[in-house]
Image (spheres, coloured by chain):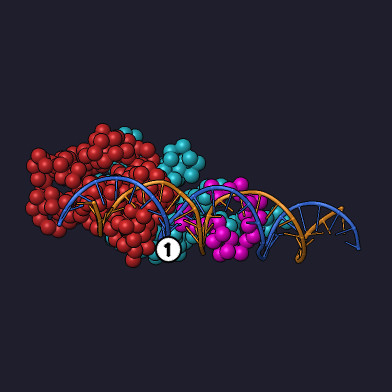
Chain colours: A cyan, B red, C orange, D blue
Amino acid sequence: MSTQNNDKRTLLVETALDLFYRQGIHAVGINEVLKVSGVAKKTLYNHFSSKEALIVATVEQRDQRFQAWLNKRLGKVAAGRATIEAIFIAVDDWINERDPALGPFRGCFFINTSAEYSDGACEIFQCCQRHKQSIRAVLYQHALVALGEEAAARRLADSLGLLKEGAIVAGHLMGDKQAAVKARETARRLMGLG
Amino acid sequence: MSTQNNDKRTLLVETALDLFYRQGIHAVGINEVLKVSGVAKKTLYNHFSSKEALIVATVEQRDQRFQAWLNKRLGKVAAGRATIEAIFIAVDDWINERDPALGPFRGCFFINTSAEYSDGACEIFQCCQRHKQSIRAVLYQHALVALGEEAAARRLADSLGLLKEGAIVAGHLMGDKQAAVKARETARRLMGLG
DNA sequence: ACACAGATAGACAGATCGGTCTACCTTATA
DNA sequence: TATAAGGTAGACCGATCTGTCTATCTGTGT
């Protein structure tokens, strides 16, 4: 049946995403995904032509989940400065695992994945790129509301983007659980709120 | 002979570092390292007890090379603000591959490696952590010279660290070759030079 | 000249990889 | 109830992985 069909596909993607995020992609074999999910190998290759296709699906899934989570967090916040601050607060909750929606914190799945697939021509890397561009678009949108002028908004969005990526990296690699708080304070200073 | 002994070891580490940085660690097998370096397998296992030991050696080698490169770049610059700016200029040259000392730019080897070995208890991850802490110490040292006050210097060093990590990530994942220039401009603003 | 340390090539082992395929089972619908 | 689609379990394939081991060669110090 079609619904079960999608159920299996979804189960595979969610299981793979969880394992890939925790352990890295090359470190997780197809057989482990099958064992954990309880799905048969034939079913996997019925839905995906290869491991790479499964990886692409997990990246897209993570993108959708992340953006849905972020939109929910930002839903009731006024556009502009308040939303920009809310983004850093959301990242802080993510790093400190105060929000179960994203699961445990192991850094940015897209940064981690692009570390393993860094060929700019490959589909996996490009999926990661698209995600980052989506997030940057959100930052620019609210920077524009905050500042009203395009060039200044671009500059602010660039700075905010760097701070956000830096916070995620520092939160993971350096174990600095305050990284997003520091990023938010720096952002406030850049927006003239410090 | 003892010198040849070290020659082989060094050759193995440099070859492995180059391959690991370009392709990722799990994606490179021991046999490939041996083939490219022209060293016999027995010799490798004479110097390293396992692949993991070789990986640790490559991370340490990258740390040494990076710090030597940075120190050279900063050698003739006045301590404080000027050195902080020079750091971002150096990162810019790295991203745009204008300085052959670090080879091609594939993002931060330590970030990439910690993406594949993210268990906080494992030796490899801890080596990556130590590197980042060394760099942060340099930032703090010059922030202190620039500001003269410890708490403010810590805040500044934190902000600069986030901008630097963000620039490296943006330069790689988003292909933003201007990332370090933007980070530098933001840093200038934070230091009251904007 | 001889002994020995350390290098070489590469066979080999055992596990695991991604991916294919067979054979059987379950279930919804005509 | 018959049919057909899609699931299950898992054997199997060739390739590759890390790591061990044998056997041979080279070069240095005494």
Q: Give the range drawn in magenta.
A: A25-52
The answer to whether residue A184 is visible is no
Residue B67 appears in view: yes
Kindly identify the residue that appears in the image at 31 percent across and 44 percent down: B168
Q: How many labels does the image show?
A: 1
Magenta-drawn stretch contains A44: yes
Q: Mark 1 lies on which chain?
A: A
**Residue nearest the observer in this picture, A151 or A172:** A172
Query: Where's the N terminus of chain A, which quadrant?
Result: bottom right
Q: What residue type is labelled 1?
A: Pro
**Residue in the foreground of this view, choosing between A181 and B167:** B167
Q: Label 1, on which residue?
A: A104
A107 and A116: which is toward the camera: A116
In depth, the one of A35 and A172 nearer the eye is: A35
Dominant SS in magenta: helix
Q: In this view, does B173 lie above or below D23?
A: above
Assess disc 1: are there few (<14), some (14-19) or many (≥20) residues with their C-alpha within 10 Å of its C-alpha.
Answer: some
Report x, y in % for residue A107. Answer: 38, 56
The answer to whether residue B76 is magenta is no
Q: Going 29% across and 35% down the picture, which residue do you hit?
A: B97
Task: Name which residue lies at 32% across and 38% down.
Answer: B104
Q: How far from the left and from the top, in percent, is residue A27?
A: 46, 57
Estimate the x, y position of residue B63 in percent, counting from the top left: 24, 51
